[in-house]
Amino acid sequence: MLLDTGAEVTILSTNFLHRLFPGQEFPDRGRSVRSLGGNQIAVKGPVMLTIEICCQVLQHSVYFCNGATMLFQQLL
């Protein structure tokens, strides 16, 4: 998993989100974001997730899209 603390948005793959929360419906609204490589990416969301990092619990908005792993491959 890649953790990018300088990113403006957090994007997970739709498949990963469904594995975390099986059977749950997610927002269908979407927007477009630009990747570091300059590509436009259609994402859906956000959904609010409770995340714990180093004993700190926070609410964080997360967007999702199909094929999110391709985003990282485009950067390499």
Image: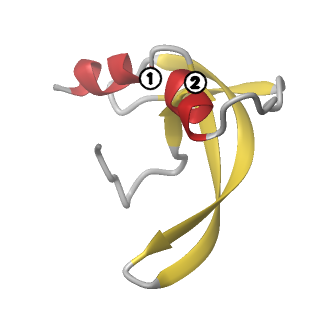
The image's mark for residue 14 is: 2
Q: Of all residues shown, which one is farthest toward the left?
A: 76
Question: Percent x, y for residue 39?
Answer: 43, 17
Q: Of all residues shown, which one is farthest toward the front?
A: 22
In-front residue for pair 22/11: 22
Tell me the kind of residue under disc 2: Thr
Answer few, some or many: residues within 10 Å of disc 1's Cα (few below 14, many 20 plus, some between 14 and 19).
some
- First-in-chain label (2 vs 1): 2
Whether pointer 2 and pointer 1 mark residues with C-beta atoms closer than 8 Å, the reply is yes
Describe residue 19's horizontal placement relative to residue 71 as left or right: right
Question: Percent x, y for residue 47?
Answer: 73, 45
What is the basis of the colouring in this image?
secondary structure
Describe residue 39's horizontal placement relative to residue 27 as left or right: left
Residue 20 falls in image quadrant: top right
Quarter of the rendering occupied by the N terminus = top left
Describe residue 75's horizontal placement relative to residue 40 as left or right: left
Could you tell me which secondary element the residue under label 2 belongs to?
helix
Describe residue 6's horizontal placement relative to residue 66 as left or right: left
Disc nearest the viewer among 2 and 1: 2
Question: Percent x, y for residue 19?
Answer: 55, 31
Q: With respect to residue 22, does 54 lie above or below?
A: below
In-front residue for pair 61/75: 61
Report how many numbered discs are placed on residues in the image: 2
Residue 51 falls in image quadrant: bottom right
Tell me the kind of residue under disc 1: Ala
Residue at the (50%, 31%) spot, across then down? 16
Whole-angstrom CA distance, mark 2 to mark 1, is: 8 Å
Answer few, some or many: residues within 10 Å of disc 2's Cα (few below 14, many 20 plus, some between 14 and 19).
some
Residue tagged 1: 68
Could you tell me which secondary element the residue under label 1 belongs to?
helix
Q: With respect to residue 27, does 15 lie above or below?
A: above
Residue at the (52%, 51%) spot, across then down? 8
